[in-house]
Image: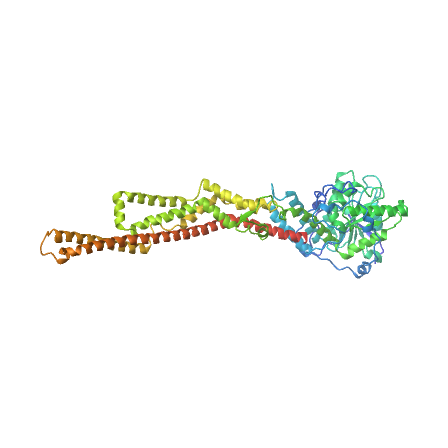
């Protein structure tokens, strides 16, 4: 054991630098000391209840950011000496006492804030810190793609990014050290406490502002602490190291970096900025208050109330107890305890000390030994910061449970609940059917079916119709009209398949808007907006796609069924038979009744055969008419079936258009929302 010098040394100019980490990573330049935003800068606390301190409703916000290096966090086991002293008797602190706190009418600030603790019980988390920080990285990535007007708050994303970076840096730097910050106002005695704990008057003591202008650090176990002190931004001339001439009690503090911060109420702006920065970076915060100003709104509303979620890494010291009587000490400590409970700091211990008489220093030292030996303060602090940032991400992750009246996709006389589908990254049930119906109406699919059926029937007349009726139409002038009508029908089909436009485009837009009005309201912002935009992202391309789908679904214009040709041949044969019958009747009349010639065969000269010839002609005429009528009925039935098949084909193709050009982009966005919600649950630890 060295005895050549005092048990402390100054890290500064002309002094040896602490050992570098084993990795050989160079110590960061102090000019690049981490920028840590305090957790209170933008977080909002609810309005105080009656009897609550006036600062309980102030506005504040959590600190910011951490990177993937947390996966390499290690916590070295304490030495045997540390272990022996890591289990001291219970610290004599003033803790939350329900019986004493009950009369206080003020409720804790989180009463109306989702996720806030309701009791002083430690919060149980389902996920480790590494998983939570990894999930936070993904939240930032997802949110950054949707930032801006109506999207994720850019300020929140900056805070989260800073937290991610800060957590990554802290977990990379000396997991074997615990950073404890002594913070307080001018004259509270924090520098005197710092000197008492350090065993030497390192930090100047006074009651005028400002006294402590720069942070001071005392390190128990300097090996590997250099990069961490650079990251904290502690000037080298104000770094002090406890040497090896330590008694057994000091050995238990091995790994402690104790900071004496500038006064938080300093009139120098830089000083208060340093306090904000270092309070955001310390693993354990110890607030030193004095009997005159322990209820000072400046420290409560700016620091303690916003840090309610960090109560397990906060300690409160009521210093200068030598100025009070025993009864006054009990009264002040009890009042401070009730005040902290009303602010949500149930887990924060209160230690009564006097830097003058040394009273309570053993209890404070035990508190530090416990923090150092457990090696949990670093992860607990970062975890509390993540809790704070998770609260701010919560509005972006939770589905709305109350929808405006009248919203809902009504199908079959019932309102379809969209929430379950959206939580699975899908659009509401029957969304595709709704779009297909609307697209079919916009494209005039029903009219297309009617036109196709009529065209088929008109075209079939040329093959299966009774030729005599066809001749009669031509002689009567009806055939050109039929031909023109057939041409008009196919022209109508061709124009329809060219793609909806004009009024039909507006119908497509209306269909997408109607579906968005059902799918989007339950979603939180900005997901409602981004899902609506994704659903409508290709709206202008949909009419042309519908036209293409319709055109590909129509049969060929001059398509003829094979059986039509067979029936046409049969009708020609029957027509021939009618003509032969007429010729036979004419021959019988000429040769049997008018004796136009002699020696004619009996088939053409026998008068008794004339009735049979007439009957045969009538039979052929009737058979031809019946064949035409029956075949036209078959054509109509076939046209109806073809119409149904074509319409089904069109609707199937329209369904593909709806999925590819509307539903798929929207469901991609909903899948991102589901991923965001899943990652948020990990970040929130629930």
Residue 247 locus on image (x, y percent): 85, 57
Q: Nearer the viewer, residue 650 or 180?
A: 650
How is the protein colored in the picture? rainbow
Q: Is residue 252 above or below residue 319?
A: below
Residue 621 locus on image (x, y percent): 25, 52
Q: Give me the residue at 31% from left, 50% from top.
A: 461
Residue 369 locus on image (x, y percent): 80, 55
Q: Residue furthest right?
A: 325
Q: Horizontally, is 15 left or right of 422 in the view?
A: right
Is residue 246 something that shows in the picture? no
Q: Residue furthest top?
A: 267
Count the marks. Answer: 0
Quadrant location, the N terminus: bottom right
Is residue 472 something that shows in the picture? yes
Residue 428 locus on image (x, y percent): 55, 50
Q: Horizontally, is 129 left or right of 286 in the view?
A: left
Q: Horizontally, is 267 left or right of 660 in the view?
A: right
Q: Nearer the viewer, residue 197 or 668?
A: 668
Quadrant location, the C terminus: bottom right
Q: Nearer the viewer, residue 69 or 579?
A: 579
Q: Residue furthest left?
A: 598
């Amino acid at each position: 054991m060295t005895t050549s010098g005092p048990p402390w040394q100054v890290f500064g100019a002309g002094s040896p630098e602490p050992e570098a980490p084993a990795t050989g990573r160079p110590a960061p330049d102090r000019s690049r000391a981490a920028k840590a935003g305090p957790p209170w800068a933008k977080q909002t606390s609810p309005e105080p209840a009656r009897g609550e301190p006036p600062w309980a409703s102030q506005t504040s916000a959590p600190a910011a950011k951490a990177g993937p290096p947390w996966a390499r966090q290690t916590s070295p086991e304490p030495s045997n000496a540390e272990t022996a002293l890591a289990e001291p008797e219970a610290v004599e602190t003033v803790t939350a006492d329900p019986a004493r706190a009950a009369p206080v009418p003020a409720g804790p600030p989180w009463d109306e804030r989702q996720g806030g603790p309701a009791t002083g019980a430690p919060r149980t988390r389902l996920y480790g810190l590494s998983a939570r920080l990894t999930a936070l990285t993904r939240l930032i990535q997802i949110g950054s793609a949707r930032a801006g007007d109506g999207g994720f708050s850019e300020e929140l994303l900056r805070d989260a990014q800073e937290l991610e970076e800060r957590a990554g840096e802290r977990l990379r730097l000396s997991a074997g050290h615990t950073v404890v910050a002594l913070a307080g106002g001018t004259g509270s005695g924090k520098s005197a406490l710092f000197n008492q704990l350090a065993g030497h008057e390192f930090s100047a003591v006074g009651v005028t502002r400002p006294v402590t202008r720069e942070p001071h650090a005392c390190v128990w176990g300097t090996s590997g602490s250099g990069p961490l002190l650079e990251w904290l931004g502690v000037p080298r001339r104000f770094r002090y190291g406890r040497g090896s001439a330590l008694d057994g009690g000091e050995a238990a503090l091995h790994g402690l970096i104790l900071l004496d911060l500038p006064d938080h109420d300093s009139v120098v702006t830089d000083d208060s900025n340093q306090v904000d920065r270092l309070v955001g970076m310390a693993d354990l915060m110890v607030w030193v208050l004095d009997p005159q100003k322990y209820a000072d709104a400046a420290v409560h509303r700016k620091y303690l109330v916003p840090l309610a979620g960090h109560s397990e890494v906060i300690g409160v010291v009521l210093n200068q107890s030598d100025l009070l009587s025993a009864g006054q000490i009990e009264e002040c400590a009890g009042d401070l305890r009730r005040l902290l409970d009303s602010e949500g700091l149930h887990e924060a211990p209160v230690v009564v000390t006097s830097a003058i008489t040394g009273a309570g220093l053993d209890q404070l030292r035990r508190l530090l030994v416990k923090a150092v030996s457990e090696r949990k303060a670093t992860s607990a602090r970062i975890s509390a910061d993540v809790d704070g940032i998770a609260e701010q991400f919560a509005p972006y992750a939770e589905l709305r449970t109350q929808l405006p009246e009248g919203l809902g996709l009504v199908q079959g006389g019932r309102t379809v609940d969209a929430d379950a589908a959206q939580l699975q990254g899908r659009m509401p049930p029957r969304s595709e059917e709704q779009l297909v119906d609307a697209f079919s109406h916009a494209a005039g699919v029903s009219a297309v079916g009617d036109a196709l059926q009529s065209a088929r029937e008109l075209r079939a007349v040329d093959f299966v119709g009774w030729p005599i009726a066809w001749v009669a139409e031509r002689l009567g002038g009806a055939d050109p009209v039929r031909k023109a009508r057939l041409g008009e029908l196919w022209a109508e089909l061709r124009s329809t398949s060219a793609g909806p436009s004009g009024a039909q485009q507006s119908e497509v837009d209306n269909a997408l808007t109607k579906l968005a009005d059902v799918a989007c309201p339950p979603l939180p912002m900005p997901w409602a907006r981004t899902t609506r935009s994704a659903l409508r992202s290709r709206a202008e391309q949909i009419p042309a796609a519908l036209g293409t789908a319709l055109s590909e679904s129509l049969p060929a214009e001059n398509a003829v069924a094979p059986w039509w040709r067979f029936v046409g041949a049969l009708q020609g044969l029957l027509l021939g038979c009618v003509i032969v019958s007429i010729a036979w009747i004419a021959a019988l009349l000429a040769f049997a009744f008018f004796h136009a010639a002699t020696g004619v065969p009996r088939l053409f000269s026998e008068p008794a055969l004339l009735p049979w010839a007439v009957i045969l002609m009538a039979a052929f005429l009737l058979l031809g008419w019946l064949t035409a009528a029956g075949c036209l009925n078959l054509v109509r039935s076939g046209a109806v079936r073809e119409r149904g098949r074509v319409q089904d084909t069109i609707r199937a193709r329209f369904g593909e258009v709806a999925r590819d050009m509307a539903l798929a982009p929207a469901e991609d966005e909903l899948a991102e929302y589901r991923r965001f919600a899943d990652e948020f649950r990990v970040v929130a630890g629930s």
